[in-house]
Image (cartoon, grey):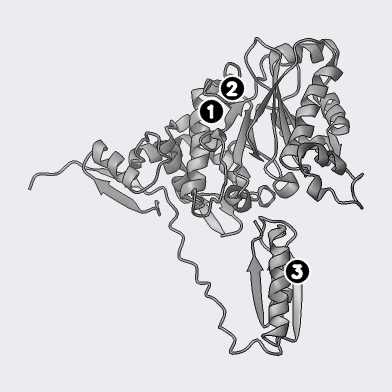
């Protein structure tokens, strides 16, 4: 039985006008959340309308399947996309993710969503060409649905509770599938505890804008990772020195070097854990000498509290020695969370 | 009567009931009381709270000023802080951005 408020309109045109005027969207064209479309999502996921997807802990805001599905429809999701949206929302409601704080912060982060498992193929997600840039339609609408949930259900909107000084394009959509099919590495979700039995999963991380790096002039894993570590160190000095989760994406042309050298994701994490560190006095070189102080000038700060704080993801198109560094919102203020698709918190 | 076709839309926004929280009663006087100054941890609160503390002591006659800082800028204040705050006469919360 539904519990959500309904609005009656005469036709699709009026539905779009009503939804737009009501502020349900993000400024881009929307799909009207008709009862039929919402119900189709619920039936696909075998969820009751009032099933609890998650509870945002600070405002104790209950997010039901029906409401999350309405936002998924608004974003352009088809029913098969909905279980992934629901899983991402469930993950964001985990206390350690700090949904309220991360989404309302002046820091302007977005929820990075990494999709693993067979559902990627079912949704046509490749995680290859133009990943994070509209390469996968499913990723685009899933990420958009996540942001609409934050706006509409957690009531975090720019200028209101969302106090972001700068946003970044990930605040429109920030989702990718890991390219598991062209990688010798373990999928991210399996490394984070999801069983390798065909379970699909999502990992969410409160993240700043991604930074692209390039190093296609070496076959040395150490040299390649030094480029990644250098980008991370720069983020620590230019933006925030506080350590937390970072995500690093490796395109195939770089992954090949690691496979040839027999490097696992664990090896990558250990190397970056050791190399991604700065001293407080390094701030002097980037115009922040005023906060170095004297007593802590030689204090060392690590980007990663532990090697496992680094999320290593296989993604990107086949050509180019490119990688990506996705920094955290703010240190350990928010922790990355991984949940299986289809898990129920209310059953 | 002709049946008019229509669509029904599921409202995607929160229908959470309005919070029942209300501001605490205004104290009739600060004199002799214990006042808490709670910072979100950003540097902007430091000098402001220094000045506020002087005012409270010199002009408003408070007995004690307690300075506290949240563990994290963007997370709710810890339960232990809120338990302590319940013993104060009044609390000033500052966002030092």
Tell me, yes or no, whether the two marked residues, 3 and 1, touch with CB atoms within 8 Å. Answer: no
Q: Is residue B34 left or right of residue A267?
A: left
Q: According to the image, label 2 marks what residue? A: A131
Q: On screen, B50 above or below A302? A: below
What kind of element bears circle 2? loop
Percent across and percent down for residue A138 are: 50, 26
Q: State how far apart marks 2 and 3 are (Cα).
A: 45 Å
Q: Are marks 2 and 3 in contact (CB under 8 Å)?
A: no
Q: Answer with left or right where residue A304 lies relative to residue A104.
A: right
Q: Are marks 3 and 1 on the same chain?
A: no
**Residues under labels 3 and 1: Cα distance?**
43 Å
**Mark 3 surroundings within 10 Å by alpha-carbon count, few (fewer than 14), some (14 through 19), many (20 or more):** some
Circle 3 sits in a helix, a strand or a loop, which is it? strand
In this figure, which residue is indicated by the disc labeled 1? A139
The residue marked by circle 3 belongs to what chain?
B
Q: Are marks 1 and 2 in contact (CB under 8 Å)?
A: yes
Q: Write the residue at 80% across / 38% down.
A: A303
Mark 2 or mark 1, which is nearer the start of the sequence? 2
Residues at marks 2 and 3 on the same chain = no
The residue depicted at 66 percent of the width and 21 percent of the height is: A315
How packed is label 2: few (under 14 Cα within 10 Å), some, or many (20 or more)? many
Q: Estimate the x, y position of residue A304 in percent, counting from the top left.
A: 81, 38
Mark identifier at residue B68:
3
Q: Chain of mark 2?
A: A
Q: Residues within 10 Å of mark 1 (few under 14, many from 20)?
A: many
| Residue at left offset 72%, top offset 65% | B47
How far apart, in angstroms, are the residues tagged by discs 1 and 2? 9 Å
Q: Quadrant of residue A193?
A: top right
Q: Position of residue A93 (x, y in %)?
A: 61, 49
Q: Is residue B27 left or right of residue A39?
A: right
Callout 1: SS: helix
């Amino acid at each position: 039985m539904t519990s959500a408020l309904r609005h009656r309109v005469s036709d699709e045109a009026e539905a779009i006008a009503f939804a737009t005027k009501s502020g349900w969207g993000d400024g881009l064209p929307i799909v009207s959340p008709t009862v039929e479309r919402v119900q189709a999502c619920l039936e696909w996921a075998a969820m009751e309308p009032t099933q609890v997807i998650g509870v945002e802990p600070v405002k104790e805001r209950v997010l039901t399947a029906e409401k999350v599905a309405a936002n998924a429809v608004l974003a352009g999701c088809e029913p098969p996309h909905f279980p992934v949206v629901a899983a991402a929302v469930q993950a964001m409601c985990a206390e350690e993710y700090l949904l309220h704080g991360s989404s309302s912060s002046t820091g302007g982060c977005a929820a990075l969503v990494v999709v693993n498992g067979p559902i990627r193929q079912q949704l046509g997600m490749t995680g290859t060409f133009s990943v994070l840039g509209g390469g996968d339609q499913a990723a685009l609408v899933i990420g958009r649905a996540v942001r609409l949930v934050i706006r509409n259900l957690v009531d975090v909107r720019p200028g209101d509770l969302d106090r972001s000084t700068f946003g970044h394009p990930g605040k429109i959509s920030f989702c990718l599938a890991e390219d598991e099919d062209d990688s010798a590495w373990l999928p991210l979700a399996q490394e984070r505890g999801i069983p390798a039995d065909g379970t699909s999963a999502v990992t969410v991380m409160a993240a700043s804008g991604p930074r692209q790096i390039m190093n296609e002039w070496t076959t040395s894993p150490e040299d390649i990772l030094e480029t990644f570590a250098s980008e991370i160190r720069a983020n620590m000095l230019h933006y925030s020195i506080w350590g937390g989760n970072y995500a690093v994406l490796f395109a195939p042309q770089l992954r090949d070097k690691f496979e040839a050298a027999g490097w696992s994701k664990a090896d990558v994490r250990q190397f970056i854990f050791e190399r991604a560190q700065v001293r407080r006095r390094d701030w002097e070189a980037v115009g922040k000498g005023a906060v170095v102080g004297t007593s802590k000038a030689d204090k060392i700060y690590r980007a990663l509290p532990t090697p496992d704080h680094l999320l290593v993801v296989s993604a990107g198109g086949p050509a180019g020695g490119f990688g990506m560094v996705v920094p955290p919102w703010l240190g350990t203020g928010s922790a990355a969370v991984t949940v299986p698709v289809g898990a129920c918190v209310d059953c | 009567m002709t049946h008019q076709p229509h669509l029904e839309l599921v409202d995607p926004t929160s229908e959470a009931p309005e919070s029942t929280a209300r501001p605490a009663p205004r104290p009739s006087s600060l004199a002799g009381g214990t006042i808490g100054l709670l910072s979100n941890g950003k540097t902007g609160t430091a000098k402001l709270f220094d000045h506020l503390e002087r005012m409270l002591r010199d002009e408003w006659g408070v007995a004690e000023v307690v300075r506290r800082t949240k563990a994290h800028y963007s997370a709710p204040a810890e339960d232990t802080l809120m338990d302590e705050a319940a013993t104060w006469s009044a609390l000033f919360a500052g966002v030092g951005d």
